[in-house]
Image (spheres, rainbow, N blue to C red):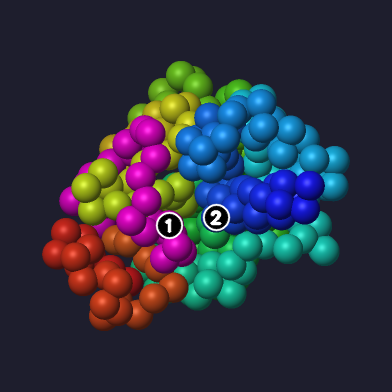
C-alpha cells in the first residue's frame, strides 16, 4: 500500500511539472510518458483538479496560472525566468511599431513590461493580453476575435486565421510549447498551430519566447522550423553551452 501511495505521489509530481512547463497537457501523452493507462491518468487529473492545483479539461488539463493570470496570489511557473525573457524581448521594440502578440504567461509578462512612453499598434489573439495592455495610453490595441480555445486561451478558427492574413506587422511575439533542433517549434493543439503559422506569415520578424526547460522537446504538431523564425529568446545568456547548436540555426537573444 505504501509503495502505491509513493508511486501516485511521484506521478502527481511529474504531471504537475509537465503542466507547469507546457501550460497544457493531454492525457494520452501523460499515459505514454508515465507508462500507465489513460484511466489512471484521468483519475490523477481528477484528484489534482479536486485539490484545486490544475484545471481539468476534455482530454487533459491546463495550468491555473495559464487561464487565471490576473489573480494576486497566482503562482506563475518560472516567473523570474519569464521576466528576464520579457526584458530581452522589449529591446526589439521601437517607437511606432506594429506588433502581433500571441498569448500565454510569458507574453503577458512582455505586455506588462512595455514602456508607457512607446507609441505602438498592437494586434493580439489573446483577450488576456488585450486587457493587460488596456492601461497603456499610447498603445492602440486591436483584439482579433473568434472562438475562444480554452486549451490555449487564445482565439482560434478560420475567421481568426483570415483576419490575421490582412495584417502586416513589424514583429510577432509568440510563446511556444516545445523547441528542438530536429522539429523546430511544436505544440499539442492543432488550432493553436494554425493561428501561429498565420502569425508568422504576416510578420517581418518573429520572436519566439521560451524558458530553457522547453528546449530539446518535441510535441505532435510542428509550428515552424528554426530557420523560419528571426529570434529565439530564453532566460539564458546567448553564449550558454546549452544553446551552441541552436546558435547555428537561429539568432539567440
Residue 210 magenta-highlighted? yes
Q: Is residue 161 left or right of residue 54?
A: left
On the question of residue 164 being in view, the answer is no
The x and y percentages for residue 13 are 65, 55
Q: Is residue 63 left or right of residue 208?
A: right
Q: Nearer the N terminus, badge 2 or badge 1?
A: 2
Residue 248 versus residue 59: which sits nearer the camera?
Answer: 59
Q: Is residue 198 above or below residue 186?
A: above
Specify whether residue 25 is in view. Answer: yes
Q: Decide: marks 2, 1 in contact (CB < 8 A)? A: yes
Task: Residue at 65% x, 34% y: name it.
Answer: 41
Which of 38 and 64 lies nearest the eye of the viewer?
38
User: How many C-alpha atoms fall within 10 Å of the one at disc 2: few (<14), some, or many (≥20)?
Assistant: some
- Kindly identify which numbered label has been placed on residue 45: none
Residue 191 lies, with reference to residue 243, above or below; the image says above
Q: Position of residue 99 (x, y in %)?
A: 43, 52
Count how many numbered circles sit on residues in the image. 2
Q: Secondary structure at mark 1?
A: helix
Residue displayed at 22% across by 63% down: 246
Q: Residue at x 54, y 59 (%)?
A: 106
Residue 223: say if magenta.
yes
The spot of residue 48 in percent (x, y) is: 77, 44
Could you say which quadrant of the image residue 93 lies in? bottom left
Instruction: State the image quarter where residue 6 is shown.
Output: bottom right
Quadrant where the image shows the C terminus: bottom left
Q: Residue furthest top?
A: 158
Residue extent of the magenta highlight: 208-230
Q: Nearer the viewer, residue 153 or 160?
A: 153
Question: What element does badge 2 sit on?
Answer: helix
Residue behind mark 1: 214
Reading the image, the residue beneath label 2 is 21
Amino acid at each position: 500500500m505504501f509503495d502505491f501511495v509513493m508511486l501516485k505521489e511521484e506521478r502527481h509530481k511529474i504531471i504537475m511539472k509537465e503542466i507547469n512547463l507546457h501550460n497544457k497537457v493531454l492525457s494520452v501523452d501523460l499515459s505514454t510518458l508515465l507508462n500507465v493507462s489513460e484511466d489512471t491518468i484521468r483519475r490523477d487529473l481528477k484528484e489534482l483538479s479536486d485539490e484545486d492545483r490544475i484545471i481539468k479539461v476534455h482530454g487533459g488539463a491546463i495550468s491555473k496560472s495559464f487561464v487565471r493570470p490576473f489573480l494576486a496570489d497566482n503562482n506563475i511557473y518560472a516567473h523570474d525566468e519569464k521576466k528576464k525573457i520579457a526584458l530581452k524581448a522589449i529591446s526589439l521594440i521601437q517607437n511606432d511599431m506594429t506588433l502581433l502578440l500571441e498569448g500565454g504567461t510569458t507574453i503577458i509578462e512582455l505586455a506588462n513590461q512595455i514602456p508607457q512612453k512607446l507609441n505602438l499598434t498592437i494586434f493580439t489573439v489573446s483577450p488576456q493580453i488585450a486587457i493587460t495592455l488596456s492601461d497603456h495610453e499610447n498603445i492602440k490595441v486591436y483584439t482579433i476575435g473568434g472562438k475562444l480555445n480554452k486549451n490555449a486561451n487564445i482565439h482560434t478558427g478560420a475567421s481568426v486565421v483570415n483576419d490575421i492574413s490582412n495584417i502586416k506587422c513589424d514583429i510577432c511575439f509568440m510563446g511556444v510549447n516545445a523547441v528542438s533542433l530536429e522539429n523546430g517549434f511544436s505544440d499539442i493543439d492543432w488550432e493553436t498551430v494554425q493561428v501561429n503559422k498565420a502569425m508568422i506569415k504576416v510578420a517581418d520578424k518573429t520572436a519566439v519566447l521560451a524558458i530553457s526547460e522547453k528546449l530539446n522537446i518535441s510535441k505532435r504538431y510542428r509550428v515552424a522550423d528554426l530557420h523560419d523564425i528571426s529570434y529565439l529568446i530564453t532566460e539564458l545568456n546567448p553564449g550558454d553551452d546549452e544553446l551552441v547548436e541552436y546558435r547555428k540555426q537561429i539568432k539567440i537573444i
